[in-house]
Image (tube, rainbow, N blue to C red):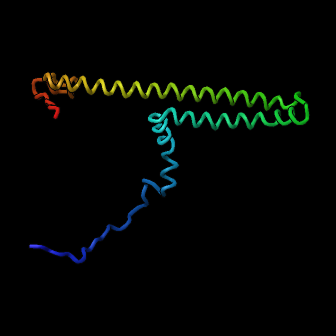
Amino acid sequence: MLVAVDEVPVSTNAQTRQSRLAGSTGDYVRRNTPAILRIYARYEPLRAFVTAAIVVGALAVLAWLPFLIDAIFNGNSRGHIQSLILGAVLMIAAVQLFALGVIGDLLAGQRVMTQRIFERVRRVELALGVPPSHYEKGSTPEAEEPTRVVDP
């Protein structure tokens, strides 16, 4: 027997207080921006740090422009020492950010390999009937039957 439903009345409770979760999408994004950046830097470290290095490197070039313009067009290379110092500091920061990206990428690769090794070891342990090594307080290895994984 088939039943067709024309409409279903839906009612909601009256609003008793203002929501504390998020006022708007923009508010939510602003509050979670640090977490979003942290996650992005963890899983895409090379891309994140190289992007930051490019931005800081571009700022270094912009800082060097007054000195370069004055030296090339006016022939006066004695002024704008502050520009040289600021540009040098920013370029050093850009190189360090790039190096952090490379190191972060290597660590991310190491983390993935370690995770795969742990997974493989656990599969071998399960195939051999070795119980898990992380029991909750109060439980004993004899009380729980080890889970066996069968590869298809």
Whole-percent x, y for residue 96 in the image? 60, 26
As rendered, which of 27 and 108 lies closer to the eye?
A: 108
Compared across the picture, whether 144 is left or right of 81 comes to left
The vertical placement of 94 against 26, above or below, is: above
Whole-percent x, y for residue 59 in the image? 70, 37
The vertical placement of 118 against 23, above or below, is: above
As rendered, which of 140 and 2 lies closer to the eye?
A: 2
Whole-percent x, y for residue 148 in the image? 13, 30
**Quarter of the image holding residue 120?**
top left
Whole-percent x, y for residue 15 in the image? 38, 65
Residue lying at the far bottom of the rendered structure: 6
The quadrant of the rendering that contains the N terminus is bottom left
**Quarter of the image holding residue 50?**
top right
Please tell me which residue is depicted at 42% across the width and 53% down the height of the picture: 21
Please tell me which residue is depicted at 13% across the width and 28% down the height of the picture: 146
Please tell me which residue is depicted at 45% across the width and 38% down the height of the picture: 39
Compared across the picture, whether 134 is left or right of 67 comes to left
**Quarter of the image holding residue 83?**
top right
Compared across the picture, whether 151 is left or right of 35 comes to left
Please tell me which residue is depicted at 44% across the width and 25% down the height of the picture: 107
The quadrant of the rendering that contains the C terminus is top left
Compared across the picture, whether 118 is left or right of 27 comes to left
